[in-house]
Amino acid sequence: MSNKGHASSRPFTSPIASMVVTVIAVLWTVPTFGLVVTSFRKKEDILSTGWWTAFKNPSFTFDNFRAILFESGGTVGEQGMIPFAINSLAITIPAVLLSVGLGLMAAYALAWIPFRFSDHIFYGLFALQGVPLQLSLLPLLTFFATGVQLFGHTIFPQLHIVGTLAAVWLPHTMFGLPLVIYLLHNFVAALPREVMEAARVDGANHFEVFRRIVLPLSVPAIASIAIFQFLWIWNDLLVALVFAGGTDDVAPLTLHLSNLGGSLGSHWENVAPAALFSIIIPLIVFFSLQRYFVRGLLAGSVK
Amino acid sequence: MITFGSILSSSWPKIFQIISVIVLFFGFYGIAFAAGARIKGKKQNSLAIGLFLVPALILVMTGLGIPAIQTFIESFKNADSSKWVGLANYTNAVKDPDIRLAFINTISWVVISPVIVTTLGITLATMLNKMKREAFAKSLIFMPMAISFVGGSLIWNLMYAYQEPNRPQTGLVGQIMVWLGFELKHLLLWSPWNNLFLMVVYIWGFTGFGMVILSAAIKGIPTEIEEAAQLDGATGFRLFRTITVPMVRTTIIVVLTTAMVGTLKLFDVIHTMTGGNFKTDVLSNRMFDENFVYLNYGRGSALAVLIFLGVIPITYYNIRSLRLERKH
């Protein structure tokens, strides 16, 4: 690939590289494209031929979408898919707000309020970030039902939230916090010391410094981490499966979709549009806010 | 027929709940900040810690810290946590052929998929660097990151769909096998290769992550170093091997370890695509089944602890590098 004389200025920059990249980009897109095409095909077509043949004699339809969204008593449930989307929103919005809101304040406290054990707490949180949430699922579920008692004292009250949306967004908030605090700490700790000290000299206390300086300066970091959290929580299955307790009433899209995929198996005329419906919101979030999303990823991984 | 009206009326309590969480959160902290701003002197430090840090700490301890300890204790008890059984859950788990298979599968997941993700990621990042239409190709490869693994699993279920050989195939992969003259197989039932087909879903979903992060690292390599190497005659693959890879070594490790932790915990793909059947079970899915299907809490907890043991070396390594970094 290198022709001596004029050395190629970068590794792998050649027609072969372009070809490889193109092939991979196509390979990565084809499966999703197949789902999109399938969701617009007629039921009998889906069953009898592959989706790639659909362009030879095209006959596309919106019926599948009408069926999953507006036909009651259909295979996807009494109320169609939209209530599940609302559940997803009602889980994701509070969890993102609380984890990012509380996380930012905690990050500020750990970075700028000097106190004993501050470092220990920071490392402790960082270590907890590595704890697989599998380790917490069952005890946490029990906590919600009975509360936490230690040496006869109630540390955490019994919450009557089992089977409600709060039982799903609260664990998401808890599980998300260590990573959010760590990422925001990276950012908040790097704010210029002079600015913070100047404000302190002017008599501003921590509440004012946080509100007038830290909050406005952190908007880009908040945006990127909020998007990251949004996608992570929206796309979660395990937490929903455990804490939504098998009731359709609070099940998010992913949970319902996973059930559909299992129970309806080959009913692609329902599964395909339902899957497409469930990925539309994250895809919109992703494509419109891609730059922030990437920045959020980088904040956690490249230093 | 469902109307928007009926959906709205049944979802109103949920929308109300979203709004009340928002109002309560901002209301509480609004008042706290207004009151806190008036307090001067030493007291404000403890008040700020109490309002800024303590709520998050309570949530993390309740959600992760205490439950993790509890699971650890549970793992030494029997199925309904009524009796101590010592290490029995662990030894039985090792003896059980199904769990042993889940072990082997988990190990192959943790070894194979992170390596592929990282290799593909750095190759793509290097090739794409300064290429025309870089952003467009990146977006396409990165897009699956936004799709849930449940969605991804269904997308790939469609790719792997199988029909009897005498019928037209509806899955693209099966069709390609036919075109190429291979024997047609029901891919998700074809053990042990079905494990690889499941890994494809993860690799498809996660390669974009590796690519984007490695790409940022590659762009951070000082051009002087690259130019110096080129003056010495390094081009193409040699430049890649002697300059690019060593310069982004830390980032390669970040991608590799993130993917390892991800695969160790991976649940959605197995649960959605095979449910752990056809010899594709992994620890994380098995742990879920033990706890929530067979109701064997002792063994489920033991499996969760085993997953944790797998994560520990990685966490330890990360904390060590973090401490080193903070010292500088």
Image: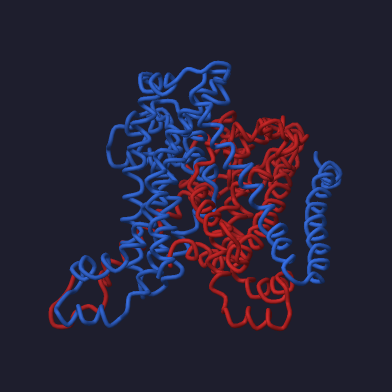
Chain colours: A red, B blue
From the viewer's side, name the closer residue of B46 and A296. B46
In the displayed image of the protein, which residue is found farthest to the front? B42
Q: Position of residue A275 (x, y in %)?
A: 59, 44
Q: Position of residue A37 (x, y in %)?
A: 54, 49
From the viewer's side, name the closer residue of A146 and A22. A146
Q: Residue at x 51, y 23 (%)?
A: B298
Residue A263 lies in what quarter of the image? top right
Q: Residue at x 55, y 23 (%)?
A: B297
Q: Quadrant of the C terminus of chain B?
A: bottom left
From the viewer's side, name the closer residue of B201 and A70. B201
Give the tally of numbered discs: 0
**Residue B302 placement, left or right of B185:** right
Answer yes or no: is residue A285 visible: no
From the viewer's side, name the closer residue of B291 and B59. B59
**Residue A107 placement, left or right of A160:** left
Q: Position of residue B119 (x, y in %)?
A: 31, 56
Q: Quadrant of the N terminus of chain B?
A: top right
Establish if B183 lies above or below A233. above
Establish if B310 lies above or below B100. below
Answer yes or no: is residue B229 visible: yes
Q: Position of residue A180 (x, y in %)?
A: 58, 57
Establish if A275 lies above or below A76. below
**Residue B243 placement, left or right of B264:** left
Residue B185 lies in what quarter of the image? top left
